[in-house]
Image: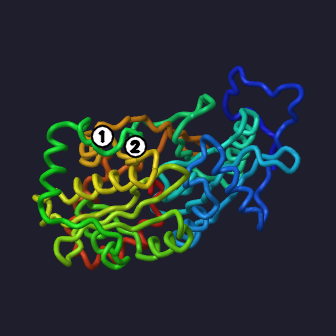
Amino acid sequence: MSNGGSVASRGCDSVPDALERAYIGELERGQEDQWDRFATLSATGTMFHLSGWQTLVEKVLGHRSFRLVARRGDRITGIFPISWIRSRLFGNCLVSSPLAVYGGICAADSDSYFSLLQAGSDLAKKLGVNYLEMRNQTEPYATALPGRDLYVTFTQDLSPGPEKLLQALPRDTRYAIRKSLKAGLEWTEDLTLEEFYELYAQSVHRLGTPVFSKDLFANLRAIFPRQSRLFGVRKGKQAIAGVLCLYFRDQVLPYYAGALPKFYKESPNNFMYWSLIAQSCGEGVRYFDFGRSKKGTGSYSFKSAWSMQISELPYRYHLVRAKEVPQMSPVDGKFQKAVALWKRMPYACTKIIGPRLIRCIPSI
């Protein structure tokens, strides 16, 4: 498909004489296990690099996927999952990867990395899209590609254990946790998908965001049965909060969540996340990944109160037809009227319209 090029500077990195150039092609059907093995063993691999994530995108959003692979002989040296989003409303683009907070190129060396980047850029040009977006968690090789200073991620090393982690939290956060522990709330793994979906759908409606269909969560559980778990918080028999967690290597990532506002005074979110942290410590999970948040949002403020490491997410864009980096975040001023209108829309209507609309939004 491609053997490299000059879409971005390779800096001082060059291919050693003894190392042949990586060959770039598309993954052949039946080779998904090889792809997943590389993603799992690579230092820059994430849950969202697994082949099943693109299967999820294809099933739920209907986007065409490209699985670009760098090889030397029979050995995979890099992977680049890409999905093609075509929307009359929001434009035409390639994203690595939709539904994911992390993505981009996962490679064992600079030659594989830049060869995959060139192949992805060539694909973007061939398809005539506006841009190629790479949701990098880290940036092992510097490029000249533009980005946007918008997202951060929060992580915590769980090895100190619950007692020390609790003591390291700010006073207000400790108070909210201890208050919630005395409120008669129950941490449970018996939450049904239907209960969780209602909690999630109501929460995103309050935020003014279109909701996914229930199929997203059903398919996610089916594709990743051992890497996804559903937890909840009950007050008596009522489910008042829930979180769908993803597990990758020694990490837990609470990915989708929701809670009922009428119980906020009892701090169900603090109870839920603290219960997850304490349980994860007991299960030997090493890292808690609180996930991506936009700067200046309520989510950012909430996570900032948990004394976690905050890291910038170096998302990068290869512009093709677009003249500048896309501004597709709901926090942008141009979307504020639409967000306000969505909040006022009847909840029942949002569950019908939302799943059709959200598949067209590149920034999800």
Q: Residue at x 21, y 69 (%)?
A: 240
Q: Is residue 231 left or right of residue 185?
A: right
Q: Residue at x 27, y 61 (%)?
A: 208
Amino acid tagged 2: Leu
Tag of residue 176: none
Evaluate whether residue 241 shows in this view.
Answer: no
**Could you tell me residue 238's position as x and y percent?**
20, 76
Q: Which residue is mark 2?
A: 158
Amino acid tagged 1: Leu
Q: Nearer the viewer, residue 4 or 154?
A: 154
Q: Residue at x 28, y 78 (%)?
A: 349
Q: Residues within 10 Å of mark 1 (few under 14, many from 20)?
A: some
**Could you tell me residue 190's position as x and y percent?**
34, 75
Is disc 2 in contact with disc 1, using a CB cutoff of under 8 Å? yes
Evaluate whether residue 282 shows in this view.
Answer: yes
Q: Residues within 10 Å of mark 2 (few under 14, many from 20)?
A: many
Q: Nearer the viewer, residue 91 or 182?
A: 182
CA distance for labels 2 and 1: 8 Å
Q: Quadrant of residue 144?
A: top right
Q: What quarter of the picture does the C terminus occupy?
A: bottom left
Q: Residue at x 36, y 71 (%)?
A: 354
Q: Nearer the viewer, residue 159 or 267?
A: 159
Say what secondary structure mark 1 lies in.
helix
Say if 65 sits above or below 277 in the image.
Answer: below
Q: Which residue is mark 1?
A: 165
Q: Earlier in the sequence, mark 2 or mark 1?
A: 2
